[in-house]
Amino acid sequence: MVSILLVEDEVVEALDLKNQLESFGYSVPDIASNGEEAVNKVMELQPDLVLIDIVLKGDKDGIGVASEIKKLNTPVVYLTGHYSEPTFQKAMLTDPYGYLVKPCNIHNLKFTIEVALQKSKQILSHDERDYLESVDNSMVAVFKTSLDGDILFVNKAMADRFKFETVDEVLRKKSLDLYKNPSDRQRFIEELKQGYSAEDEFEMLTSDGKVINILIRAHLTDEVVFGTMLNITKRVQAENKLKESLSDKEVLLREIHHRVKNNLQIISSLLSLQERYVEDDSVDLLKESQGRVKTMAMIHEKLYQSPTFTNIRIKEYIMELVNNVLYSYGVNGSIVPEFDIEDLKVDIDTGIPLGLIINELVTNSIKYAFPQRSGNIKLQFKSNDDYELVVADDGVGLPEDVNIETTDSLGLQLVNSLVKQLDGRLEVDRSEGTEYKIIFKRLKYNEGI
């Protein structure tokens, strides 16, 4: 039975995928949840194939795992929901046996696995690989020039690439004739003089004047430049199309955040209108719900304004959020906020629960800590290895008989749930007023993916 090591850090998704693979008759002896564990499991279990996500918790991503186990000749198939052209190019350097983007059809996954397994059985012998490599090299555009630009040697592949009939036609040209921007060659020569080898991309001209994109790898020896040229025109065109597509998606994503914010604002306004038609005891409930909706609306507003669409400037967000809560309860000016917040950026998965926690704790202080409707609320947010949030007031203090973990208060129940969502811990100090301290770690994903 074929054994497959599954590397996936999303537990539910991993279990579902394991069941599907086993329904096809494969054995899934184990599931690794991070890069370090995956490498150890490959060494221990020696599976027939590794099915791996690229983005993993921890310091080692899926590409790093594939690079590390490459020497074992274990076939690797990427199954990832994080596609981008740079990520794909980086993944291809590990010579994977397949690359699928989630969500994918399960039958396509089975087909990819079967092809990978068949391919792994047909690895060529060392001599055969050497032979094919020599054939491939004979088709690579090879050149030799002087520093002055005289073309000393080209092979037939070089002539074909630039649409010359013969090698002799190329030899009668000067190197500068092949560059769209002649200054590019001089810049490349300077790079060679500094390091004796260099690699760069250029726009170059064929014999009929057509612009092509060329990757040049060369080295300098005894005043002679020797190197190869690779036509990357299709890759550059694909990258340009991808950039255009990403630009369109950014516009769409910006509009989505804007509309979500507007829709949440409408809900908040409806709750505000409803306050006029309810009994006094229900007004606070509507006001609290309105505050929660506004908290989420502000997140989407900040993402709409952010150039990256992924990070929120937390200092600006917290200050605006707290002042908004104080204003909604009519205590701005009598209850004074004090801020000690580092200028950090957090993603939406951290920003939403963090904002809701602050909204609940500040609202709770306003309602219960200040019978005279005056006092101070202090907010701190900082980060070393962990994030640390402190919300404190100098009010009457939380009663000793209130158990923060078993309280009937919806707001504090919500705070407890959100702290668990952040995989953090909550500490309460009742010695002077009430101080809530929440410490939680950020989830670590490999950057640049």
Image (spheres, helix red, strand yellow):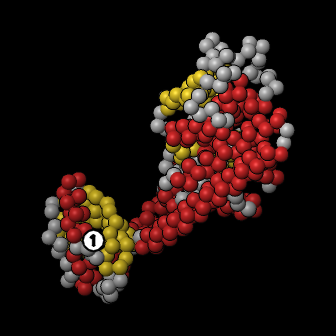
Q: Residue furthest right?
A: 279
Q: Is residue 255 visible?
A: yes
Residue 227 spot, x, y in % from top left: 29, 65
Q: Label 1 amino acid?
A: Phe
The one of 334 and 84 positioned closer to us in this rendering: 334
In which quadrant of the rendered view does residue 289 lie? top right
| Other residues around mark 1 within 10 Å, as few (<14) / some (14–19) / many (≥20) | some
Q: Residue at x 73, y 62 (%)?
A: 105
Image position of 204 with respect to 303: above or below: below
Q: Is residue 420 visible?
A: no
The one of 274 and 52 positioned closer to us in this rendering: 274
Image position of 177 with respect to 132: above or below: below
Q: Residue at x 67, y 16 (%)?
A: 396
Residue 95 spot, x, y in % from top left: 53, 56
Image position of 407 with respect to 45: above or below: above
The residue that mark 1 highlights is 143
Residue 21 spot, x, y in % from top left: 76, 51
Residue 236 spot, x, y in % from top left: 43, 69
Q: Residue at x 46, y 37 (%)?
A: 343
The one of 162 and 233 positioned closer to us in this rendering: 233
In which quadrant of the rendered view does residue 335 lie? top right
The one of 301 and 426 positioned closer to us in this rendering: 301
In which quadrant of the rendered view does residue 165 lie? bottom left
Q: Is residue 228 left or right of residue 380?
A: left
Q: Residue at x 78, y 44 (%)?
A: 275
> Disc 1 on helix, strand or loop?
strand
